[in-house]
Structure formats: structure tokens, C-alpha cells
Amino acid sequence: VAWQVAWQMVLHDAIFYHCHRLLHTRAFYRWHKDHHSVVGSYALAAEYASDAESFLGHNLPVFVPAMLLSLLGDCVSFAAFLSWISVRLIHSYAIHSGYELPWLVGALMMQSSGADAHHENH
């Protein structure tokens, strides 16, 4: 389970990075601007997105790693997928919360440096 969660994290970071960069291009920003319209920092702002952004920026980076691993012959267990979803949501809510929680970000081994760095993105 830990191995599958780790691979999902690595693949998610790569896919999310490219999808998020795409959402900041002129052609796609209209779907991402709602997320940047949030003024305050609160955890549920992580979920504030248009349908197009939810698909491109949230769903693809979460589901594609599990599908890729399964296609490569390492079928992701339900426990590994739920563990991964839990880690991803905790991380996303933490960086949108406005609180700097470096111990949590480090513990989850995610690419973000925390709420301060994410707030600079907004």
C-alpha cells in the first residue's frame, strides 16, 4: 500500500504541475480565475473551482496515477487509493487554510512549501 501511495504522489505532482500551468495560460485561465477570486484563506477554497478546472486540475491529477499504475500491472488497491485521496485532501486543505504547517507538508512529502507559498500564487 505504501509503495502505491508513494507512486501516486509522485505521478500526481508531475501531472498537477502541468495541468495547473495549463490553467494559467490565456486559453484556459477563464476556468481557473474563479479559484483565484477567493480573497481570504480558508481550507474549502481548495474546492472552489469551475467544472472544467475540477476536471483538469483536480480529477485528472488524482485518477490518472492510479489508472497508469494499474495499466502497468500494479493494480492499485482500494486501501492505497483511499490513503492517497486522504493525503491529497489534507495537503490541499492545509495549504489553502492560511496556516503555515511545515511539519504537515514535510510529513506528507508533497511539493508545496505550505500556505505562505500558495498564497503568493493567489
Image (cartoon, helix red, strand yellow):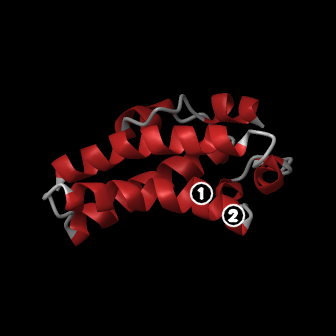
Identity, as a three-letter code, of the amino acid under mark 1: Leu
| Category of crowding for the residue at label 1, using alpha-carbon neighbours closer than 10 angstroms: few (below 14), some (14–19), many (at least 20) | many
Q: In which quarter of the image is the N terminus?
A: bottom left
Q: In which quarter of the image is the C terminus?
A: top right
Determine the residue positioned at 72% across, 61% down. Answer: 49
Hey, which quadrant is residue 31 in on the image? bottom right
Determine the residue positioned at 46% across, 36% down. Answer: 105
Residue 99, percent from left and from top: 64, 39
Number of labels in the image equals 2
Hey, which quadrant is residue 81 in on the image? bottom left
Helix, strand or loop at mark 1: helix
| Category of crowding for the residue at label 2, using alpha-carbon neighbours closer than 10 angstroms: few (below 14), some (14–19), many (at least 20) | some
Give the side of residue 105 with respect to residue 94, left or right.
left
Query: Is 94 above or below relative to 110?
Result: below
Residue at the disc numbered 1? 56
Determine the residue positioned at 65% across, 28% down. Answer: 117
Which residue occupies the foreground of this view, 47 or 62? 62
Residue 92, percent from left and from top: 55, 50
Identity, as a three-letter code, of the amino acid under mark 2: Ala
Helix, strand or loop at mark 2: helix
Residue 5, percent from left and from top: 26, 51
Farthest residue, direction left: 73
Hey, which quadrant is residue 113 in on the image? top right
Residue 54, percent from left and from top: 63, 63
Residue at the disc numbered 2? 52
Q: Do the residues labelled 2 and 1 touch (CB within 8 Å)?
A: yes
Determine the residue positioned at 86% across, 50% down. Answer: 37
Give the side of residue 53 with respect to residue 3, left or right.
right
Q: Residue 87: give its label.
A: none
Mark 2 vs mark 1, CA separation in Å: 6 Å
